[in-house]
Amino acid sequence: MRISKLMASSFAIAGIGVAGVAPIANAEDGGSATITNQTVSAKVRLAGVDRYETSQAVSAATSLDSVLVSDKSPDGLIASLQAANDDKSAVMSPKAPSLGGVNRYESAANVAVAGDADAPLVIANGRSDVDILAATSYAANLEANLLLSEPNQLGEYAAKALSELNPENITIIGGTGVVNEQTKNQIEELTGKKVSRIAGDNRYTTALAAAQVMGSHNYLLVNGKNPVDALTLAPLAKRNNASVVLIQTSCVPQTVLGALAGKHLTAIGGTGAIADNFAAKTCEQQAAEEAAAAAKAAAEKAAAEQAAREAAARAANPWGAGTPQGIAYDMLGEYGWGPDQMQPLVNLWNRESGWRTNAGRRGGPYGIPQANPGRKMASAGADWATNPATQIRWGLSYIKGRYGSPAGAWAKFCARGWY
């Protein structure tokens, strides 16, 4: 058993035995689904009514004496790794003792320096709680120390801790986007040792890569978007030679799914964190379905809004917005006429053309206003032969210039049968 100097002092008042923890019953057959002829099943679920009871369930599953650790990340992760390295389990509590650092970087450095100076060393991005989570389960299996780095430089606390440590090997968890090559080179210069890196394209493949390097047969499934149930997994990972693997509530990334087949899977948290049918879809399939549903909803919303606008236009235009008569009604004001001129116009053009754009023949009287010949309407637009708005605009201009108003044109028509 590895007992750290810091553990002996800070956890002496916080120890509680398994007898003091109410175990949460494991749910056999925690969830399964079949995809491309392979079945992925979680045989065990460790969960409680909240994240505190879930951490108790995780602790009880180790059969180890427990210590209290912070309910905040990453201090809870750091303290849980410390507990694992001292063969203790961890129970999350808001009353846990402080790790004593001014920030997460110093807290991790304090714990590392208080531990075995010759132990392996794992380094993770201090700003990425999910990478720290993957790093702690990996480190627990190696009984390694953990230091937290900035993305582009090691940072003062980690650099100072390195001067006091003599790790046999050093591993960075995460790609160059989270701990860059300059930082890796800085670590190698400070220690004189080659630094390895375990990384994937994202948080999911990085955690999986760490599990595969470790050669674990047991995977602890954690919600990669909201890993609040996973702060105290390091002791369980060490106890069962297990690794944290990240998935989502109701889907598994395609790059992760194939690696789950044949593994012993434990779901961490309730069904709100990891659904029973978590592998029913890949996350790529789910994202495509959600995008399609969002596009459909957007199209339906746009159609409803358009329908509402059209209904409002119809309500504002008693002659039918967009119809030839409605177009004419909307144009009346351009010629200084009021709505009272619409009925005479309707009467006139009902008799002349029935408001049909193709009434008559182009070489003679044609269109809604029966321009004679129809090509006269070209002065209003090149589309005079087919566009009702063009024909109506020409007709209203003609009426304005010849009769003053539709009422005048209708009176002339009634008197002699043409206008």
Image (tube, rainbow, N blue to C red):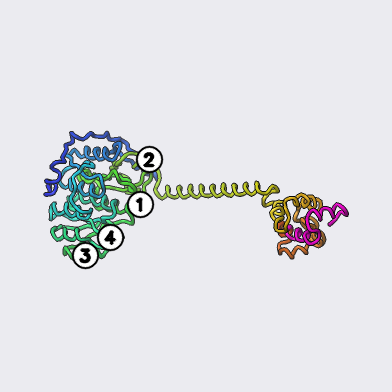
Mark 2, residue position: 277
Q: Is residue 24 above or below residue 384?
A: above
Q: CA distance from mark 4 to mark 1?
A: 25 Å
Dot 4 falls on a residue whose secondary structure is loop
Other residues around mark 1 within 10 Å, as few (<14) / some (14–19) / many (≥20): few
**Residue 410 is inside the magenta segment:** yes
Q: Decide whether the magenta segment is chiefly helix, strand or loop.
A: helix
Magenta-colored span:
392-419
Quadrant including the N terminus: top left
Q: Amino acid at mark 3?
A: Gln
In the rendered image, residue 262, in percent from the top left (x then y), is placed at 30, 44
Q: Going 75% across and 58% down the picture, which residue do you hit?
A: 396
When asked about the image quadrant of residue 57, the answer is: top left
Dot 2 falls on a residue whose secondary structure is loop
Nearest to N terminus: mark 2 or mark 3: 3
Q: Amino acid at mark 4?
A: Pro
When asked about the image quadrant of residue 35, the answer is: top left
State the mark number for residue 255. Answer: 1
Mark 4, residue position: 151
Nearest to N terminus: mark 2 or mark 1: 1
Mark 3, residue position: 186
Q: CA distance from mark 3 to mark 1?
A: 32 Å
Q: Are marks 4 and 1 in contact (CB under 8 Å)?
A: no
Labels 2, 3: front one: 3
Dot 3 falls on a residue whose secondary structure is helix
Q: CA distance from mark 2 to mark 4?
A: 36 Å
* Image side of residue 57 versus residue 288, left or right: left
